Image (cartoon, rainbow, N blue to C red):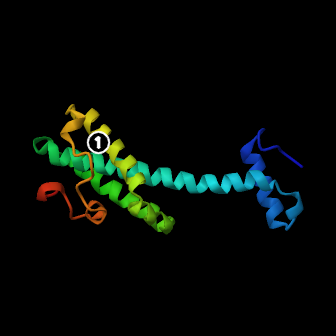
Amino acid sequence: MGTRYEQDVVAWANEQAALLRAGELTAIDVRHIAEEIEDVGKSEQRELASRMSVLLAHLLKWQFQPSRRSKSWEFTIRTQRKEVAYVLDEAPSLRGKFIDAAWLDIVWSKARSAASNETGLDLNAFPEVMPWAVDDVLSQEFHPNNGKPL
């Protein structure tokens, strides 16, 4: 076998792809290929969680600090919604995460923490449970407390 997975993952991946394309299935590194495929899914899940927590943190800031609303916050909200939509277009199966209470709880917890850190408000100032429906959060028209975009 050529390059070992532990030595150079990029060279290894290129070699494995070439082996697969050539139909040399007995020569492939099945264990590491399986791990890499699983990691792709985990990476997409982390991307979705990250985008959602940033979006939710900015919606919290929008709601709890109306006097500090800015074009920058509006831009971040709009951008994160588009990025979430892009992730979901690329991996539609991730929509199932929105009905996974444990996953949503983790994302909401990260959002609350970020909003607290960024606003200086106590963590307890923010709801312990997400007060908005996911469909609203992802809608370009939604802003908490009927706050209009800038």
Please tell me which residue lies in front, 142 or 8: 142
Which picture quadrant has residue 80?
bottom left
Residue 125 visible in the picture: yes
Toward the left, the furthest residue is 67
At which x and y percent is residue 150? 15, 54
Q: Is residue 143 left or right of residue 35?
A: left
Q: Residue at (43%, 65%) from the top-left corner?
A: 95
At which x and y percent is residue 126? 21, 42
Q: Residue at (56%, 52%) from the top-left corner?
A: 42
Q: Residue at (31%, 51%) from the top-left corner?
A: 55
Q: Identify the element where label 1 is drawn.
A: helix
Q: State whether residue 54 is above or below residue 95.
A: above
At which x and y percent is residue 45? 50, 54
Please tell me which residue lies in front, 52 or 16: 52
Q: State whether residue 135 is above or below residue 65.
A: below
Residue 150 visible in the picture: no
Count of numbered tags = 1
Query: Disc 1 marks which amino acid?
Result: Arg
At which x and y percent is residue 40? 60, 55
Please tell me which residue lies in front, 122 or 23: 122
Q: What residue is disc 1 on?
A: 112
Which picture quadrant has residue 131?
bottom left
Badge 1, how many Cα within 10 Å: few under 14, some, many 20+?
many
Q: Is residue 121 left or right of residue 134?
A: left
Q: Residue at (12%, 56%) from the top-left corner?
A: 145
